[in-house]
Amino acid sequence: MINWQQIETVMLDMDGTLLDLHFDNYFWLHYLPKRVADIHQQDEEQTRQHLVARFEQERGTLNWYCLDYWTEQLQVDIPALKREIQHMIAIRPHVMAFLQQLQQSSKHVMLVTNAHRNSLNIKMDNTGLGDLFDELVVSHDFRHPKEQREFWHQLKISHPFNPATTLLIDDTFSVLQSAQNYGIKHLLTLLQPDSKLSKREHTEFPGILHFDEIMPITDIKL
């Protein structure tokens, strides 16, 4: 599926790609509504419906991913609430072996995420994945999410890469589409970002279930 000889830069998403998206889905759709309702003494189901509607309004924008924004909007400490269930953060199968092979190769390996830096820090602290990347890139630093062309433009200025020899692996269609429109040539998605949800049968981009499908990685550093 991947001709590793054609790849110089590997960009990897975090949530739903390297990490099981179940943590995030559970936090935003179940745990957060419950805790907000508890803290503000509200009805839990009404709170959940209200939050789901609010999340949908911000989908695809930087606010959607911004913990500072939701902390202010909801008047709760979102990072602290995430830490309450941080034991649920889980690395997807074969991710460690995949990243270790990448580190042994000549590829430039980047984590490129829309996640807020506080969320990134919580997850790196819990998984230890941070040391397996050459760079950790957070879209908030560019004030544009990966869904927008300006993100890729700013990324290329700050972290030069050749779109023709870059592989992006991401679980979100709109991100992959944006990257494709920018000119990134090699694109892969995940067929089951959330381990508790059904496998996606049809994706607009080539998909894998687990990373062992695109191993071994050739071009080992001497």
Image (tube, rainbow, N blue to C red):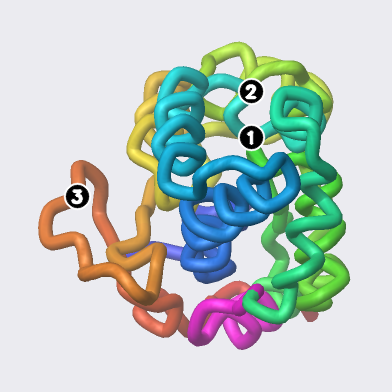
**Secondary element type, mark 1:** helix
Q: Name the one closer to the observer, 191 or 206.
A: 191
Identify the residue under disc 1. 65
**Secondary element type, mark 3:** loop
Residue range (magenta):
89-101
| Quadrant, the C terminus | bottom right
Dots 3, 1 in contact, CB < 8 A:
no
Which residue type carries mark 2?
Leu
Determine the image quadrant of residue 112. top right
Q: Position of residue 2 (x, y in %)?
A: 37, 63
Identify the residue under disc 3. 203
Q: Position of residue 161 (x, y in %)?
A: 68, 35
**Secondary element type, mark 2:** helix
| Alpha carbons under labels 2 and 3: distance apart | 24 Å
Mark number for residue 62?
A: 2
Question: 66 above or below 13?
Answer: above
| Alpha carbons under labels 3 and 1: distance apart | 23 Å
Q: Name the one closer to the observer, 165 or 124.
A: 124
Question: 90 above or below 45?
Answer: below
Give the residue at x 76% y 65%: 123
Determine the image quadrant of residue 41. top right
Q: Position of residue 189 (x, y in %)?
A: 36, 54
Whether the magenta-drawn stretch holds residue 216 is answered as: no
Give the residue at x 77% y 57%: 81
